[in-house]
Image (cartoon, helix red, strand yellow):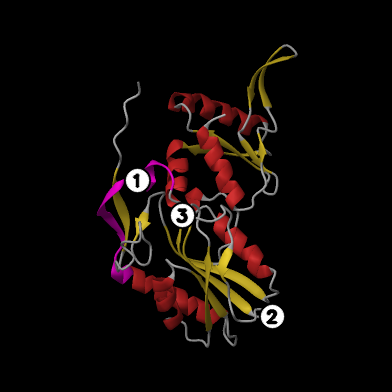
Amino acid sequence: MHPSEKEFADLLDYYHINYLYEPRSFPLRWDGSRVVEMFTPDFYLPEYDQYFELTTMKQNLVTQKNRKLRHVREMYPEVNVQLLYRRDLMRLMGKYGFGPLSEVSVEGTERVLFDEATVQRRVRELGAQLTEDYAGEEPVLIGILRGVVVFMADLMRAMNLPVQVEFMEITHYGEEREKSIDVIRDVMTELKGRHVIIVEDIVDTGLTLRYLLEYLQAKGPASVRVCTMLDKSVRRMADVPIGYVGFEVPDEFVIGYGLDYGGRYRNLPYIGVLQPVEPKAVPQR
């Protein structure tokens, strides 16, 4: 019905997530036996039993959609529905190189969320916790390239354990290849019967992490847990278990300590918020 829905569908296809488009309408108001108002979410993900409604077509409809969504939650409490606002979709697509946010100019750091001392103190705490939890074991740390390299280096040095280190790399949405997530650098270590720790720089939607968990579980490890420096749970679209979290971050574009924007800012010793300059709106004719 709208290009934004096609973009969202492409994103789901990329992650091999099955979906149905507008499969069900929820009656909200009746005139006698006749239904006079309904709510029809745009997408349904059967595997997660999750509905998504996009509010990117006309922002003046947001209030109406929110009202309908409240009624759905009151009348159908067993139904899981999430609204994706214009900014949510723009940030999702911008992350993968599409849409207006992929073309904005950037001035640098708007503000610092966690300074260098705070970051290093938290990494030491995570290392100590992992040392305690995996005492007597030799876990395999698997870092997901490329943003994790800084955190990975500091974390493994903060662990007083024998560890093995591996790196994985996956495709990125928008590259000149088939638009489908795939592993392009796999682990070399045999994982069967081993304790595996996936190390991430940030978890937001959880879609990539969900794919990696399923991929690694198929290798028969004794356990698989996740340690992430940053958790942006407000953006979660897939319910994934996270065992260790450095910091919870707000719904903003963060940079530094391995996280980049267009390949820049990875070497900042702190974690900050990007300061983008929004593109000027094009006048409508």
Query: What's the residue at 58%, 65% (across, down)?
Result: 183
Marks 1,2: beta carbons within 8 A: no
- The kind of residue on which mark 1 rests is Glu
Q: Position of residue 58 (x, y in %)?
A: 46, 26
Label 2 packing within 10 angstroms: few (<14), some (14-19), many (20+): few
From the image, which quarter does the C terminus lie in?
A: top left
Q: Is residue 234 above or below residue 117?
A: above
The image quadrant of residue 80 is top right
Question: Which residue is the site of mark 2?
Answer: 193
Question: Which residue is the site of mark 1?
Answer: 103
* Left or right, 111 with reference to 170: left
Question: Which residue is the site of mark 3?
Answer: 232
Mark 3 or 1, closer to the camera: 1
Question: Which residue is most to the top?
Answer: 32
Q: Is 17 in front, or is 53?
A: 17
Q: CA distance from mark 1 to mark 2?
A: 46 Å
Question: Which residue is most to the front?
Answer: 176
Query: What's the residue at 47%, 86% (across, down)?
Result: 160
Label 3 packing within 10 angstroms: few (<14), some (14-19), many (20+): some
- The kind of residue on which mark 3 rests is Lys
Q: Position of residue 266 (x, y in %)?
A: 34, 65
Q: Position of residue 161 (x, y in %)?
A: 51, 86
Highlighted magenta segment, given as a residue range: 98-118
Secondary structure category for the residue under label 3: loop
- Please report whichever mark, 1 or 2, sits nearer to the chain's N-terminal start: 1
